[in-house]
Amino acid sequence: MSKIRIVTDSTADIPLSVRQELIIEMVPLKIHFGSEEYLDAVTLQSDQFYEKLRTSTHFPRTSQPSPAEFLDLYRKLLEGPDTEIISIHLSSALSGTYQSALLASTMLEEDEGKVHVVDSRSASYGIGALVVAAAKAAMEGQSTEQILQLVRSMRENFYIYFLVDTLEFLQKGGRIGKASALFGSLLNIKPILSIDAEGEVAAIEKVRGHKKAIARILELLAADLAGGGIHTLHIAHANNLEGAEQLREVILQHFAVQHADYIALGPVIGAHAGPGTIAAFVSKV
């Protein structure tokens, strides 16, 4: 096992099988329906969440892990000789999760400097792609600085576009960010959203109709990629596999893609994006 351990949080939406294969540690956020509390991706999985969302009379709320939860995990991992930790988390503009992890790292007086906390400036598989790449690099024997440089480079060459059925969930969850100007839109207007360089939800533009929105995402990707291909494509969805399949097929028809896969948006991300959301997470060659 590598002496560099990789830690993330549940909003990275990394499948359990991948986390197990790459020995990625995960600290869950919490999700609340009224007085009921669940651990994201631990005691509440995606399919269970969307069913509960459909039937519950309560709007879901989410909360971040405490510094103590990160501290307990860091101490456990640092029991190994010469161990270092790279901890990659949900955008600090969207949650206090990064700050909790950072605070925990400062409480390790006897292991000062051994935990490197990274703000992904992203969400869902925008985090997950960085974490998976870091874990693979650690297994290959790369150094801490090499892995951190890889993460920084990927973060600057990563593109996210997503379509939501409604802005209600982002607004009620307080994550509307720079997309607030989209309120009051006419019927059938589909907002194309992204996450900007500061890690905030941002509106790209409003398009009338689903097909036109998909076509516009293709145009935006073409400009981003500047004639190049796609190294990895992850299509994510919030209980909308049909929409995800449509988006995947259209992208595959227009770009050379080395690797493509599906990701289910987990409970915490789904609570803010809302059911029906589809998203493209793109890392260029």
Image (cartoon, grey):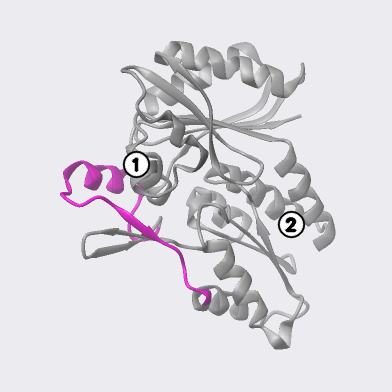
Question: Relative to the observer, which residue lies in front, 241 or 33?
Answer: 33
Can you see residue 57? yes
Can you see residue 143? no
Q: Position of residue 58 (x, y in %)?
A: 20, 52
Q: Read off the residue under disc 1.
A: 169
How many angstroms separate mark 2 from mark 1 (CA)? 38 Å
Question: Relative to the observer, which residue lies in front, 17 or 68?
Answer: 68
Q: Is residue 210 above or below residue 149?
A: above
Q: Residues within 10 Å of mark 2 (few under 14, many from 20)?
A: some
Q: Position of residue 270 (x, y in %)?
A: 38, 44
Q: Read off the residue under disc 2.
A: 139
User: Which amino acid type corresponds to the residue marked 1 in the rendered image?
Assistant: Phe
Q: Position of residue 243 (x, y in %)?
A: 40, 23
Which residue shows up at 50% across the image and 57% down it?
95
Which residue shows up at 15% across the image and 49% down it?
57
Q: Is residue 43 magenta?
A: yes
The stretch in magenta equals 42-67
User: Which amino acid type corresponds to the residue marked 2 in the rendered image?
Assistant: Met
Q: Secondary structure at mark 2?
A: helix
Which image quarter: residue 101?
A: bottom right
* N-terminal-most mark, 2 or 1: 2
For the residues carrying marks 2 and 1, which lies nearer the camera in this image?
Answer: 1
